[in-house]
Image: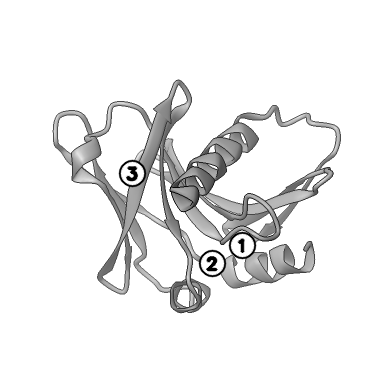
Amino acid sequence: MRLMRERLMMACLLAALTALPAMAQDRTVATFGDWSLRCEAGPPRNCETATTLSNQESRPMAQIVVGRLNPQAPVLVMAHLPLNVQLPAGVRLMLDNAPIVLQYQRCVPQGCFATIEVDDALMRRLRAEPAGARLMFQDATRREITLAVPMRGFAQAQAALAAQR
């Protein structure tokens, strides 16, 4: 139950961070290829890495965020998806054609959030920056949505994130 509450709190925190105005005074941002490092002044100082996923028309459709709720919390991968998705269908992050299943945590007016706790093996796979990574979910009409996940710069962004702790 405690782990579920932490995950839900992380999803809420990350949702709040992604909804903050770009003009936030104490925000720092650095770019590493397709990934950004974003930090909000604390205490505690909170940092995350993120990338935006676009559809074939180059319209932003989703965001992948990697971060922690606090220094003791586990690292989570969070997918921030649009509203009107099929919740029972779940969310899959495909790395080297192997699915990683993210669990929906909640939907709010800004979108729906799905997360997975990152263990060492998953972090190694992500840091390898696999080509062809993609995020898959279904919209409300059960149409499969597949978005390319740009991995260029992920390892460097994670190294910069680790240096912020």
* Whether residue 46 is situated above or below residue 142 in the rendered picture: below
Which residue lies under the disc numbered 3? 56
Q: Earlier in the sequence, mark 1 or mark 2?
A: 1
Q: Earlier in the sequence, mark 1 or mark 3?
A: 1
Tell me if 35 is positioned left or right of 3 in this view.
Answer: right
Which residue is at a point 25% across and 71% down the rendered structure image? 97
Which residue is at a point 26% across and 71% down the rendered structure image? 98
Q: Check disc 3 and give the amino acid type.
A: Gln
Which of the labelled discs sits on residue 33, or is there none? 1
From the viewer's side, name the closer residue of 59 and 145: 145
- Examine the rendering and report whether any part of residue 84 can be seen: yes
Helix, strand or loop for disc 3: loop
Helix, strand or loop for disc 2: loop
Foreground tag (2 vs 3): 2
Q: Check disc 2 and give the amino acid type.
A: Arg
Contact (CB < 8 A) between labels 1 and 2? Answer: yes
How is the rendered protein coloured? one colour
Q: Quadrant of residue 20?
A: top right
Which residue is at a point 65% across and 64% down the rendered structure image? 157
Foreground tag (1 vs 3): 1
Q: Check disc 1 and give the amino acid type.
A: Gly
Helix, strand or loop for disc 1: loop
Q: Quadrant of residue 68?
A: bottom right
Which residue lies under the disc numbered 2? 152
